[in-house]
Image (cartoon, rainbow, N blue to C red):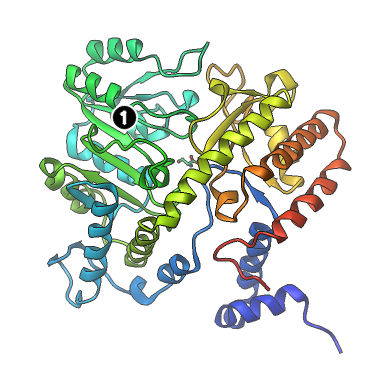
Amino acid sequence: MTQTPAHQQTSAHQHPALTATDPELAALVTAEERLQADTLRLIPSENYVSTAVLEASGTVLQNKYSEGYPGRRYYEGQQNIDQVERLAVARAKALFGTDHANVQPYSGSPANLAVYLAFAEPGDTVMGMALPMGGHLTHGWGVSATGKWFRGVQYAVRQDTGLVDFDAVRELALKERPKLIFCGGTALPRTIDFAAFAEIARESGAVLVADIAHIAGLVAGGAHPSPVPYADVISTTTHKTLRGPRGAMLLAREEHAKAIDKAVFPGLQGGPHNQTTAAIAVALHEAAQPSFRSYAHAVVANAKALAEALLARGFDLVSGGTDNHLVLMDLTSKDVPGKVAAKALDRAGIVVNYNTVPYDPRKPFDPSGVRIGTPSLTSRGLGTEHMAAVADWIDRGVRAAGTGDEDALPKIRGEVAELMTAFPAPGLPTA
Ligand code: DSN
């Protein structure tokens, strides 16, 4: 008698309907569950959501159209959906202490595009940190619609410190008089000085947009200063340190509420993804608990410990370390390109992304750096006491990449998987 392979048994147990309808797809989901369980996930923009968030995002709420806003919809039958969205909005406002919240943006890029629609006209000048310096595509970078339809001017970090040079930012803002100034980004290991950006925005007459996608969970948990007293608009995804579903929110002062809402719908989007709104509401509830404050501080403590352990092993880190959840490694002195290191680490069960470093002489698709972070491993319960082992695995993996020692990688992978077994991931099947 032929036996059902183990992974199919697990799939049937965890996803019975999916397995019956589409075993091919179910097997891929099961394989991804296994991968997320067994590996050390260090991509700083990723995390593990709770089972409650997963359940909310897989509900029948996804069957409903609800263009408009609670109490002002273009479709009937909103008795429950309106309450779901009101709950998410109320929780967002309470958690971050803002006047207004819009929870409908499909993700971070559409959220940022809505800000342009609310405050700028095509061709207007906008300002953000350059992508290779750690900014984001949607902060006016040339290949993005925001850099094609608007005139993007970009600021940098200092080459000697890796930190924002506020004198240069002020000089650029006063010269260019942008409509929008974005602060925040995707590869920034240091605290964002929202007050300094706000002063420059005021002097230059710009709307200040704080993109806190990476650090929203740290802000919510009190592990990073809040932009709320300083920024006109705050944009964030909900799935990074905030540990919610893939989605986004715009938070704003009351004076900007109408402009933001009009820009999201009908300006840019159609019906909101109600199942995501529900899962955002759950994540915001979780983030309001005392345990989430501990989580946010643990993320930072782990990142600092990991940075120290990497420095002790001779790695160069952009800005010399970290204040938040993220560490940007410059592998130039190791003579291993970021992409080569990232692919070797992947084979060793350590999932990172290759990344440009400021003033990178290499190309974005083959850069000098690797970007890592601690949100996911902290969600699994790893603490500062584990960071030396993590740094050791990274060190061995990068050295193996440099020498072409393929045999070293599966050995590391086995050690990683063994530790991970002791720290089950939220939301993943345990059997
Ligand atoms: N892709 C996100 C990140 O990884 O930081 C930014 O869009």
Indicate the position of residue 315 as horizontal and vertical percent values. Answer: 69, 24
The image quarter containing residue 405 is top right
Q: Amino acid at mark 1?
A: Phe
- Residue at left 81%, top 53%? 414
- Residue at left 19%, top 32%? 120
Label 1 crowd (10 A; few <14 / some 14-19 / many >=20): many
Horizontal placement of 347 versus 217: left or right? right
Q: In this rendering, is residue 86 above or below 339?
A: below
The residue under label 1 is 182
Indicate the position of residue 78 as horizontal and vertical percent values. Answer: 20, 74
In the image, 52 versus 28, the foreground residue is: 52
In the image, 240 versus 262, the foreground residue is: 240
The image quarter containing residue 419 is bottom right
Q: Secondary structure at mark 1?
A: strand
Q: Can residue 18 be seen at all in this image of the molecule?
A: yes
Indicate the position of residue 57 as horizontal and vertical percent values. Answer: 42, 67
